[in-house]
Image (spheres, coloured by chain):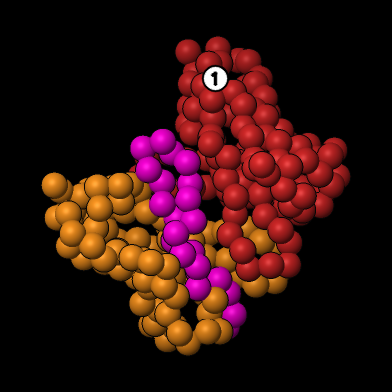
Chain colours: A red, B orange
Amino acid sequence: DGGITQSPKYLFRKEGQNVTLSCEQNLNHDAMYWYRQDPGQGLRLIYYSQIVNDFQKGDIAEGYSVSREKKESFPLTVTSAQKNPTAFYLCASSMVGTGYGYTFGSGTRLTVV
Amino acid sequence: AQTVTQSQPEMSVQEAETVTLSCTYDTSESDYYLFWYKQPPSRQMILVIRQEAYKQQNATENRFSVNFQKAAKSFSLKISDSQLGDAAMYFCAYRRTSGTYKYIFGTGTRLKVLA
């Protein structure tokens, strides 16, 4: 079955460490997105990519980095420069040029310890 | 810039009753898409319903329907015959029809269903 897979489900990071969140889709979607979810703030866009080898900053890109070397994969690295990384991270994908909604992954909960 | 506002942080409804969740948005575009997403305790985001702005007719999906008022920039979600499984966070979202395909989300409404 087609879908979008995020791993791991839970991730713990020590202060000063970089961590990478995985997002893989087999839906043949062109576009992929990373959102951060905090209580009371809805979903905020971190980065998005509409084509391989190209990506754009969202509203809260500082302290994060991404790559899009393959259509299926869009990993997110949370760097030590991100001062408040504890949050729930959602990856999504969609077809470009259509009005269909996002397909979301099941999310990764990142906690700084 | 486009914005989406959900002014009700939390709502409650009795089982089998009807509830309406509010959403307003701001845009200078004439054509766009609007969506309602449900996020149950599992935190998996589920598309509930979508509306294309150029369509006058309100979208309906089983017990879920919308009241789309384009001039007022309002997009409310009505849930009829509420069920315990409807308890979740509900997010309203906006997307342009061209250019970037990123969504703008509201801050969400937590819906409680009382037995």
- Is B26 drawn above or below residue A95 in the view shown? below
- Secondary-structure class at tag 1: strand
- Is A94 drawn above or below residue A80 in the view shown? below
User: Is A8 covered by the magenta stretch?
Assistant: no
Q: Is residue A31 visible?
A: yes
User: Is B36 covered by the magenta stretch?
Assistant: yes
Specify the subunit that label 1 lies on.
A
How many other residues sit within 10 Å of disc 1, few (<14), some (14-19) or many (≥20)?
Answer: some
- Is B55 drawn above or below residue A85 in the view shown? below
The residue at which mark 1 appears reads as A11
x, y percent for residue B88: 33, 47
Q: Residue at x 62, y 26 (%)?
A: A7
Q: Is residue A34 visible?
A: no
Q: What's the amino acid at mark 1?
A: Leu
* Quarter assignment of residue B15: bottom left
Work out whether residue A16 or residue B111 is closer to the camera in this orientation and state it: B111
x, y percent for residue A41: 41, 46
- Please indicate whether residue B48 sits to the left or right of residue A53 in the image: left
User: Is the N terminus of chain A in the top left, top right, bottom left or bottom right quadrant?
Assistant: top right
Q: Magenta part of the protein: which range?
A: B28-51
- Is B47 drawn above or below residue B68 in the view shown? above
Q: Residue at x 71, y 36 (%)?
A: A24
x, y percent for residue A86: 48, 27
Q: Tag count in the figure?
A: 1
Q: Residue at x 53, y 59 (%)?
A: B104
x, y percent for residue A108: 54, 30
